[in-house]
Image (cartoon, grey):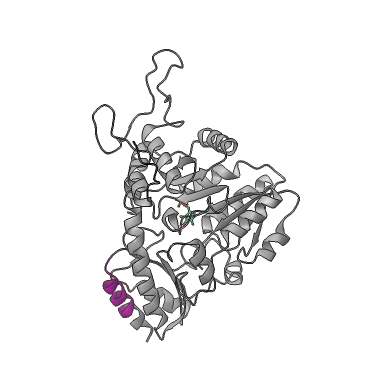
Amino acid sequence: MKSERKAGFGTVAIHAGQAPDPTTGAIMTPVYMTSTYVQEAPSKTKGYDYSRSHNPTRTALEQNLAALEGGRFGLGFASGMAAIHCVLNLFRSGDHVIAGNDLYGGTFRILRTLYEKFGLETTFVDLTDLAQLRAAFRPNTRLVMLETPTNPLLRCCDLQAIAKICRQQQVLTLADNTFATPYLQNPLALGCDIVVHSTTKYLGGHSDVVGGVLVSNDPDLHKQLTHFQNSCGGTPGPMDCFLVLRGTKTLHVRMDRHCDNAIKVAKWLEAHPRVERVIYPGLPSHPNFALAKKQMKKGGGMVSVELKATVAQAKKVCSSFGVFSLAESLGGVESLVDHPASMTHASIPAEVRRATGLQDGLIRLSVGIEDADDLIADLDQALRRLK
Ligand SMILES: *Cc1c(COP(=O)(O)O)cnc(C)c1O
């Protein structure tokens, strides 16, 4: 008799959506490099007719990611932005969106410079303040779009409380879970309607693929999203799906190391005389520490640091690392450093950036899974440039 017990995260990560190949027994899901599928008779298929609509490698990935988020349905995309774009197609001119005010720069950009011209208006609010959220609702509000922890200020908003408010208002919630990953936090279980990931980051985990995913539970919602996925065509190729699927097999192991290294780095930085403030959800000094502890398993792999430095000095520090690489993106095995004001968040106007608390001297670390001692030694020598 098969056991009824629920498999743990690591087992799901390695096995969900994947079975040995029925023809050869290959343990790894094959990369189905095909655009079309032979039909026995017109419309008599084996479930696949054209690879924009469906591809077996993508199916495996979609099922795997849905299982990791504890959701029913997964949809794969060519990028995180393609996934977010798919969700925005649910709305029409005259509808209203409420979004967090320190979202990923690309999300801010698609709402502000693209959807606004089609008549979809967005109000940006600080979602850590539920009063601000409540005040922003209008009769035509259809979506609340949130990130937690946010990028790069790592603010945490209350998923359960926001989902509850949205349910009362009959408004959908879209949670970008890229920073936390399904290993640390599951927004669907806390009441959110849709989860989006840039699989480019921790899920892929090796800085070698760009991709996105949506996970949801409601069959009607999933049907609409599937229609947009196929109609707009921002789907990933089979090789991209394979790479993400390979990445998710080690997600739990990598995340544990990312988190262990990040807390060590954060504590070391907090004691450094040239550091104004360390922002890390796993540190008691973080303003949302209690909430982060409640809804996240650990603090994550991202650490932001406000240096006692001018912009020029902050840029100099960013260019002085030996182990950390100066690059956009995050979530790979290797450590990266970013200067948001001049790199990832440069598309946000300077006055908007400063108003939301993003200082020019802030640097963002994506703490990798190298040895923590080497990362700290590298930070030590780079911060000496400030003397
Ligand atoms: C990178 C990122 C995105 C966009 O994903 P792409 O794969 O680059 O299109 C969206 N949200 C967050 C939080 C991200 O870090």
Percent position of residue 80, x then y: 47, 49
- Residue at the image point whose x is 60% and y is 41% from the top: 89
Q: Count the labels in the image.
A: 0
- Residue at the image point whose x is 41% and y is 30% from the top: 51
Percent position of residue 26, x then y: 24, 34
Give the residue at the far right of this rendering. 139
Majority secondary structure of magenta residues = helix
For the N terminus, which image quadrant?
Answer: top left
**Residue 32 position by quadrant:** top left
On screen, residue 207 versus residue 358, left or right, reads left
Closer to the camera in the image, 287 or 273:
287
Give the residue at the far top of this rendering. 41
Percent position of residue 317, x then y: 38, 76
Q: Give the range drawn in magenta.
A: 370-381
Query: Is 372 a magenta residue?
Result: yes
Placement of 326 over or under 209, stated as above or below: below
Q: Is residue 204 visible to us here?
A: no
- Residue at the image point whose x is 41% and y is 35% from the top: 59
For the C terminus, which image quadrant?
Answer: bottom left
Give the residue at the far front of this rendering. 1
Q: Is residue 246 visible to us here?
A: yes
Query: Is 186 a magenta residue?
Result: no
Closer to the camera in the image, 30 or 14:
14
On screen, residue 36 versus residue 377, left or right, reads right
Closer to the camera in the image, 54 or 218:
218
Closer to the camera in the image, 259 or 67:
67
